[in-house]
Amino acid sequence: MERVVIVRYAEIGLKGKNRGYFEGKLIKNIRKIAKPPEIYKRYGRIIIKLKDEDFSEFENRLKYVFGIQNYSFAYAISHDIDEIKNAAKDLMGKYLNNQRTFKVETKRSYKQFPMKSQELSAYIGGYLLEQYPQLKVDVHNPEIIVGIEIKEKEAFVFVGKKKLYGGFPVGVSGKALLLLSGGIDSPVAGWYLMKRGVNIETISFLSPPFTTEKSVKKILDLAKILAKYSPDAFRTWIVPFTEVQQYIKQNVPDRYSLIIQRRSMMRIANKLAEKIKAKALITGENVGQVASQTLTNLHSIEDASNIPILRPLIGFEKTEIVDKAKEIGTFEISILPYIDSCVAFAPKNPATSSFVDEIKNIESSLIELKNLEDKVYEKIEKFVF
Ligand code: ATP
Ligand code: MG
């Protein structure tokens, strides 16, 4: 009896002609992220052969692979009925705690197998009842489901299915650049797009010397969490933004300084996006959360970008974002008190509405702005994980 993991991938199975490409990418990503000893494609599933590895450590790595719907630890065996019985008994023994009810579910794509699906389920069910008299069969709401899949070359027996995030393998949906602040929202925004198969790099704007190395470390620690989902090296860029902020602070009416700062960030992010061939920007913006996030201000900000701005959290409740941040492990880092940008550059009363034309008009009088944006861009620092 060989121990394997059966990996199932519902959504990417739907992709018609692209199916082969998606499956190939998923296998590559599993190889790079979960590092299985042996992996191959069979019957619309991915099969991973395990040797002596620590199963729980392997599971921990597997959960970082987007594109997997669910998986089961299984025995891969022959069509021999005694082997199927042994496998079912053995697995039940491993999984049984205090559960009382179970059922057996068979799927048979190999029609030459001598028993029909129902028959085999009933037969193995009966055998398990003999072996584990404390159990009862419950076909409607069982605590344990023993699965049997009869395929052409082999049979698989497993207990239960463990759900993962689903989505698409990272890399199949192109690349985008995430504006990563030290806040709660932007890491979660990046996570959601990676889940949709988008490869990301990140850019962060800091205000040294008002922000310290602790802010840098915070950004890098957040990026490292996202990097776990990436099959390839993950790049994080940090821009020392202070000179631009100081210039805006001195030359722009306080109420508009935030919007103009954000437009500067967009222009610099566009420049980097072009260099790294990212096709969109991602932000953690959300309607109504803060002054910069009204509809008119979102417009005034996005006007400075030539590429689309993706905002996966736009309609989320704050509590939903916080829950997700806790689940993926970014929350504890995000709430550390090291800020991304000096509070001295934050306006006292930021405008909650604005007109693009008015903003552009103010900007046109800022003759040094473009030069300073170029200057800070030259000082951009790259980190690779
Ligand atoms: P977050 O929790 O992600 O910081 P927020 O609710 O604080 O978001 P804002 O401060 O208005 O909202 O920022 C909106 C978005 O703009 C952020 O989610 C992020 O994508 C981007 N952003 C803001 N400040 C920075 C920064 N210093 N560096 C990089 N991106 C930033
Ligand atoms: Mg913020």
Image (cartoon, grey):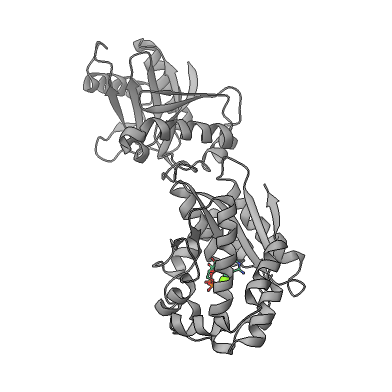
Q: Is residue 289 visible?
A: no
User: Is 51 located above or below residue 168 in the figure?
Assistant: above
Q: Position of residue 266 (x, y in %)?
A: 55, 67
| Residue 226: percent from left, percent from top | 57, 51
Toward the viewer: 360 or 215?
360
As rendered, which of 8 and 385 lies closer to the eye? Answer: 385
Number of numbered discs present? 0
Quadrant position of residue 335: bottom right
- Residue 167 x/y as whole percent: 41, 45
Kindly identify the residue that appears in the image at 49 percent across and 73 percent down. 301
In terms of image quadrants, where is residue 347? bottom right
Residue shown at the point (39%, 21%) measured from the top left: 156
Q: Position of residue 218 (x, y in %)?
A: 68, 62
Q: Is residue 168 above or below residue 20?
A: below
Q: Is residue 53 above or below residue 315?
A: above
The answer, for residue 72, to whether it is visible in the render is yes
Indicate which quadrant contains ligand 2: bottom right
Looking at the picture, tell me which residue is in the foreground, 216 or 295: 295
Query: Residue drawn at (63%, 62%), measured in percent from left and top?
Result: 333
